[in-house]
Each structure stands twice: as structure tokens, then as C-alpha cells.
């Protein structure tokens, strides 16, 4: 007869809870030129604080309420591009692409999304250690640059409701 297994040995780890550590305070607009915003980072004080020493902390950038009344190009998202430099010269700093298929319909107040537009989650977990190792990480500020992709014709204004950073 075999011994019963200890149920605590095989119990799954409790799920981690994400904590917002930075966010924009008001909406802003993207256009034909790269747009840079800065997020003031705050040390986690809630659920993410218990994972501070973890080497596997997850980090997510949320882009919410991405709206436009016209079709718009996709946008590339970069982190900590050197000031005054062209983002496309730094492919190592590219962390995501925001597709805009369906943007106009999602932005329509009478549409199925009630005008809330599109929202995106960009997993930057792998990028943060690279930025730290490359001495391109400021624990108090994160610069996020949005750069429009190829587009024929004028690039319309795209409103971004909020950008926030979460540690998990």
C-alpha cells in the first residue's frame, strides 16, 4: 500500500494579482509623427510588492480606449528611445504593434463597443531585463513612443484614452 501524497506539495501556486504602477492622467493624440509619453513609475505597494524580488515578474503595458473617426495606420510601440532619435533606428526597443483593423467601427458611439475603441495589452516582461542590462532603464520613469506604420494618405488623429503599466 502506498503512502498518501502530501496535498500541499502539489498544490498550484496562487494566481498573481496585477498591480498598476504607472498611468497617464489624461487622454492624448497620436498623429503622423512619433509621439512620446512618459509614465512616472511608483514602487508596488499592494499584491505585486510580494513579488518584487522575483526574477519572473510579469510586466504589462495597457493601451486603452484607442479611438478614431477614420481608418488609421497601425502603430509600433517602443520603450525608452533615446531623446530626439528616430524610433525605427532602434528595433531592439520595439515591444509591440497595435493593429487598427476595425478601429473606426469600435470608435462609433452607436456601434457594438459604444465608442470605447480598441484596447491592447503589450507583454513587456522580456523587454524590461534587456533595458536594465543595457543601462536603459529608469526605475522612476518609462518613456513610451508610438510611431505610425506605413499609410497612404494623411494620418488621422488617433485618441488614446490611457496608457498604464502593471507589475504582476
Image (cartoon, helix red, strand yellow):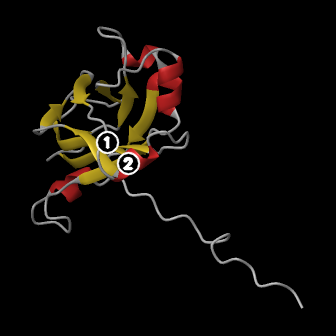
Front residue of 5 and 168 = 5
Q: Is residue 112 above or below residue 22?
A: below
Front residue of 134 and 103 = 134
Q: Which residue is mark 1?
A: 44
Residue drawn at x 45%, y 33% is 95
The quarter of the displayed image where residue 137 is located: top left
Q: Relative to residue 165, is residue 2 drawn left or right?
A: right
Q: Is residue 8 above or below residue 114?
A: below
Dot 1 crowding, Cα within 10 Å, few <14, some 14–19, many 20+: some
The image position of residue 86, as x and y in percent, is: 36, 13
Front residue of 59 and 69 = 59
Residue drawn at x 38%, y 18% is 87
Q: How many marks?
A: 2
Dot 2 crowding, Cα within 10 Å, few <14, some 14–19, many 20+: many
Q: Which residue is mark 2?
A: 48
Q: Secondary structure at mark 1?
A: loop
The image position of residue 82, as x and y in percent, is: 36, 11
Q: Relative to residue 51, is residue 113 drawn left or right?
A: left
Task: Tell me, yes or no, if residue 71 can be seen here.
Answer: yes
Whether pointer 1 and pointer 2 mark residues with C-beta atoms closer than 8 Å, the reply is: yes
Which mark identifies residue 2? none
Residue drawn at x 90%, y 91% is 1
Q: Secondary structure at mark 2?
A: helix
The quarter of the displayed image where residue 21 is located: top left
The image position of residue 90, as x and y in percent, is: 46, 17
Residue drawn at x 31%, y 42% is 44
Q: Residue furthest top?
A: 84
Front residue of 152 and 33 = 33
Mark 1 vs mark 2, CA separation in Å: 6 Å
Task: Tell me, yes or no, if residue 92 can be seen here.
Answer: no
Amino acid at each position: 500500500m502506498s503512502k498518501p501524497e502530501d496535498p500541499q506539495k502539489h498544490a498550484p501556486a496562487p494566481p498573481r494579482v496585477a498591480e498598476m504602477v504607472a498611468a497617464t492622467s489624461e487622454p492624448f493624440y497620436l498623429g503622423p509623427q512619433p509621439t512620446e509619453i512618459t509614465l512616472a513609475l511608483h514602487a508596488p505597494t499592494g499584491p505585486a510588492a510580494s513579488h518584487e524580488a522575483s526574477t519572473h515578474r510579469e510586466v504589462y503595458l495597457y493601451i486603452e480606449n484607442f479611438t478614431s473617426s477614420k481608418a488609421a495606420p497601425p502603430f509600433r510601440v517602443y520603450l525608452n528611445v533615446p531623446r530626439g532619435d528616430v524610433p525605427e533606428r532602434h528595433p531592439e526597443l520595439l515591444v509591440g504593434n497595435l493593429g487598427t483593423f476595425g478601429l473606426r467601427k469600435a470608435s462609433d458611439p452607436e456601434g457594438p463597443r459604444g465608442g470605447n475603441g480598441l484596447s491592447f495589452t503589450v507583454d513587456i516582461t522580456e523587454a524590461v531585463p534587456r533595458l536594465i542590462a543595457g543601462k536603459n532603464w529608469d526605475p522612476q520613469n518609462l518613456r513610451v513612443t508610438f510611431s505610425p506604420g506605413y499609410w497612404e494618405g494623411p494620418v488621422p488623429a488617433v485618441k488614446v484614452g490611457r496608457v498604464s503599466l502593471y507589475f504582476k
